[in-house]
Amino acid sequence: MSKQRGRIAFSAQIMNEEVLQRYLLEVNSAFDGLLARDLTVEEFVARLKELDETYISQFAEEGYRATGGMGDAFKTAARRASDFINSFADNFGKDLAADPNRDWRWRALMYPREGSRLAYVLGQQDAMRERGARAWQRVLHPEASSTGPCTLCIEDSMLVHSIEEPFESLHPGEVCTVMESIAYYPQPPERIPPGEKPMVELPTPQKISVPQVIQMLKDAAASLGKLGLSIIRRIRRE
């Protein structure tokens, strides 16, 4: 980490991989229960929401503590993140019921992939609010991406948001993989002078790719013997 006037340059933020691995594995196992008819669609959706709330709270606290938060404001971040992520779960259940023969596994695994990242960033924002931040701005790093940013990310990076406006994942999944960070300002958006440097710039956690998800599940399953082998085959669709 290197310090400059008005800005701190960080390497890419990495969340607790062990917790993320457990989150992925539990969602994957719940989906297997759905396929095996051990869970109904309604029971699977309820289990998915429960797992989201449990693990999202941990990532919100992790982001909050890593940014210097000392209280329990991360609970607000956890609630915001879980409410947003779980707002899609009921429609997921409808799609599962309407087309039970389709392979929905990767859509199920998007919940831990996106939920963990969103919760971490919202935890960061709650800590930065405590530190006096009143505005934030998305900062893109196309030099750290093979594809570059999409139009949606570019347009949003031109806006300065109030600290009361929470960070959003603009497009879950693989639409855009550009690395990004968030610049924080001590003034509200309308009072930031042109060219003003931020008080700090924090990286968002790296987006977890499909190959990384597969590897994490394989690593988790490797310690489960024959059961682990069957999990690996299902992940690979063998």
Image: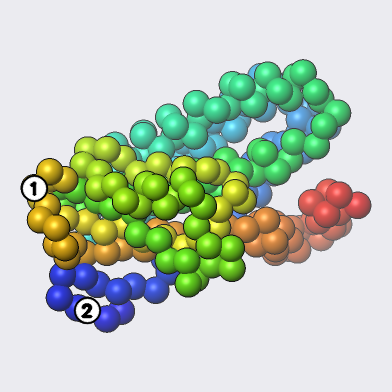
The span from disc 1 to disc 2 (Cα, nearest Å) is 25 Å
Q: Position of residue 78 (x, y in %)?
A: 37, 39
Q: Position of residue 55 (x, y in %)?
A: 48, 44
Q: Which residue is mark 1?
A: 191
Left or right of 43 in this view: 88: left
Query: Considering depth in this image, is 167 or 38 the residue closer to the camera?
Result: 167
**Residue occupying the point 66% across, 23% down:** 93
**Residue occupying the point 64% across, 26% down:** 92
Q: Which residue is mark 2?
A: 3
Q: Which-is-in-front pick, marks 1 and 2?
A: 1
Query: Considering depth in this image, is 170 or 114 the residue closer to the camera?
Result: 170
The quarter of the image holding the N terminus is: bottom left
Q: Amino acid at mark 1?
A: Arg
- Residue 132 visible: no
Left or right of 120 in this view: 195: left
The residue tagged with tag 2: helix, strand or loop?
A: strand
In the picture as drawn, the residue positioned furthest to the right comes out as 238
Q: Amino acid at mark 2?
A: Lys
Q: Position of residue 181 (x, y in %)?
A: 36, 61
Left or right of 72 in this view: 156: right
The residue tagged with tag 1: helix, strand or loop?
A: helix
